[in-house]
């Protein structure tokens, strides 16, 4: 089994981090806004789907008329 060297490990971590392409501040901002928009749209969609399914169940079972 190979011996573990914390110093060598940290050097390898630094080499890998140097290879990462970090997004710009603008890219992070635009992506964040897009996430919020999609979450809002998904929330509205599921609200309507939930209401429709609830209405159908109440209609079929004859509840709450």
Image (cartoon, helix red, strand yellow):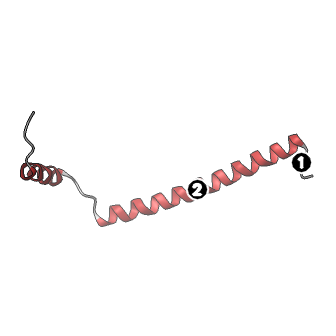
| Residue at point 52%, 60% (across, down) | 37
Q: Nearer the viewer, residue 12 or 33?
A: 12
Q: Which mark is residue 63?
A: 1
Instruction: Give the farthest residue toward the top.
Output: 1
Q: Earlier in the sequence, mark 1 or mark 2?
A: 2
Left or right of 53? Residue 31 is left
Left or right of 32? Residue 65 is right
Separation of residues labelled 1 and 2 (CA atoms):
30 Å
Q: Secondary structure at mark 2?
A: helix
Which residue matches tag 2? Answer: 41
| Residue at point 46%, 59% (across, down) | 34
How many marks on residues? Answer: 2
Residue 39 at x, y = what percent?
53, 57
| Residue at point 65%, 51% (across, down) | 46
| Label 1 CA crowd tier, 10 Å (few <14, some 14–19, many 20+) | few
| Residue at point 38%, 65% (across, down) | 29
Q: Secondary structure at mark 1?
A: loop
């Amino acid at each position: 089994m190979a011996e573990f060297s914390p110093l060598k490990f940290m050097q390898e971590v630094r080499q890998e981090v140097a290879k990462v392409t970090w997004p710009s501040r603008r890219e992070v901002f635009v992506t964040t806004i897009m996430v919020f928009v999609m979450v809002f749209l998904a929330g509205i969609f599921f609200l309507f789907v939930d209401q429709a399914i609830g209405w159908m169940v109440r209609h079929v079972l004859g509840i709450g008329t």
